[in-house]
């Protein structure tokens, strides 16, 4: 064993460097200025299918993004192998700013929101007029999510051959929401798809609706099978003639420019993340009347200034009723 004398400053003495000194840390991240731009088409267990120019590229999120997750519709920047060949993998290094977000929570008591779709222009709320029966409160919740996230709503009513749309249209008439009424025969013959496609041209549209309303059947009519295959349609399974969506998927429209984003059927739509002050933006005729409201006004309390605003003739009473009905959907009730 080697022993050292009193003077231990010899050059050959070995010391173990500390971990902090072996690898200098920095907050500077690479800018990746040469990264290619793409659009996320679907997300499946950490793997993302991204459209880069006219190629479908598989990618994973870079570690430097931390917990920030990309969702369907996101515009992202990628580096690595962008050929789209089998068994190749690119890396997403940046998620660009979003123009809109469709968000939901598991329920109204859940504080954690989840972004379902990004950068969509409109939200197509699909509901059957019968079999299953319409669920107005679920429709209201989807409307609130659309107004809150910056999407324009579109009401699509299916199965008009089983029940007339008049009652449902009366409920939403004061909201001035564009709508389309379709029947099963039209869907099978393609007529309904043509009328819906006219409302979708040049836009990115997210489709939502609970199971059984014909949402995915309509999406299939809008996007031919070959286009679904060409965009890496890996998150849907087909069984006994029924097509079931298991995660959100962006698909290019046929015949016109535009995209549809098919989302899984929903049983509930939690709105714990929604602030009433953002919903009022969807009512430009009522919004100026909130200047006299008390701080953190729910717009449905005795001191709300909107009552006087409407009484003075600045807006219609039916519009105020519609606003308060939508805001009331944030309170959970049985049967949603």
Image (cartoon, rainbow, N blue to C red):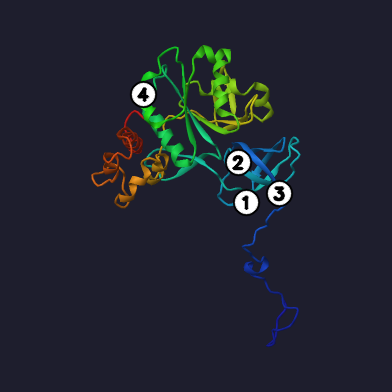
Mark 1 and mark 2: Cα distance apart in space: 12 Å
Residue annotated with mark 3: 35
Which SS class for mark 2?
A: loop
Q: Nearer the viewer, residue 308 or 224?
A: 308
Name which of mark 1 and mark 3 comes first in the sequence. 3
Q: Comparing marks 4 and 2, which lies closer to the viewer?
A: 4
Q: Residue at x 59, y 26 (%)?
A: 236
Query: Is 47 located above or below residue 28 in the figure?
Result: above
Residue annotated with mark 4: 170
The image quarter in which residue 198 lies: top right
The image quarter in which residue 199 lies: top right
Q: Are marks 1 and 3 in contact (CB under 8 Å)?
A: no
Q: Nearer the viewer, residue 133 or 284?
A: 284
Q: Residue at x 64, y 39 (%)?
A: 39
Residue annotated with mark 1: 63
Mark 4 and mark 1: Cα distance apart in space: 51 Å
Q: Is residue 158 visible?
A: yes
Residue 50: x, y in percent? 66, 38
Name which of mark 4 and mark 2 comes first in the sequence. 2
Q: Is residue 269 visible?
A: no
Which SS class for mark 4?
A: helix
> Which numbered tag is attached to residue 234?
none
| Outermost residue, bottom side | 6
Name which of mark 1 and mark 2 comes first in the sequence. 2
Q: Are marks 1 and 2 in contact (CB under 8 Å)?
A: no
Q: Say left or right for 119 vs 29.
A: left
Residue annotated with mark 2: 46
């Amino acid at each position: 064993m080697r022993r050292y004398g009193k003077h231990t400053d010899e050059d050959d003495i070995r010391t173990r460097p500390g971990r902090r000194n072996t690898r200098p840390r920095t907050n500077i991240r690479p800018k990746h200025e040469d990264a290619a731009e793409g659009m996320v088409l679907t997300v499946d267990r950490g793997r993302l299918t991204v459209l880069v120019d006219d190629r479908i590229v598989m990618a994973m999120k870079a570690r430097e993004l931390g917990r920030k997750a990309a969702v369907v519709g996101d515009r992202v920047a990628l580096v690595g192998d962008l050929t789209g060949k089998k068994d190749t993998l690119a890396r997403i290094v940046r998620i660009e700013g979003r123009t809109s977000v469709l968000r939901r929570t598991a329920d109204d008591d859940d504080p954690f929101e989840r972004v379902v779709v990004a950068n969509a222009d409109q939200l197509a709320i699909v509901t059957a007029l019968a079999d299953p029966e319409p669920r107005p409160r679920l429709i209201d919740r989807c409307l609130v999510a659309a107004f809150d996230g910056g999407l324009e709503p579109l009401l699509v009513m299916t199965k008009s051959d089983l029940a007339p749309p008049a009652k449902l249209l009366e409920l939403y008439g004061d909201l001035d929401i564009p709508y389309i009424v379709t029947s099963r025969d039209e869907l099978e013959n393609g007529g309904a798809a043509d009328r819906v496609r006219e409302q979708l041209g040049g836009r990115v549209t997210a489709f939502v609706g609970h199971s059984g309303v014909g949402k995915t059947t309509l999406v299939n009519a809008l996007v031919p099978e070959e286009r679904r295959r060409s965009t890496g349609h890996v998150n849907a399974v087909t069984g006994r003639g029924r097509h079931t969506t298991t995660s959100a998927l962006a698909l290019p429209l046929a015949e016109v420019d535009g995209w549809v984003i098919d989302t899984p059927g929903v049983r509930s739509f939690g709105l714990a993340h929604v602030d009433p002050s953002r919903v009022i933006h969807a009512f430009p005729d009522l919004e100026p009347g909130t200047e006299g409201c008390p701080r953190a006004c729910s717009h449905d309390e005795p001191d709300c200034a909107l009552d006087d605003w409407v009484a003075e003739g600045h807006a219609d009473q039916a519009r105020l009723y519609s606003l308060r009905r939508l805001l009331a959907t944030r309170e959970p009730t049985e049967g949603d």
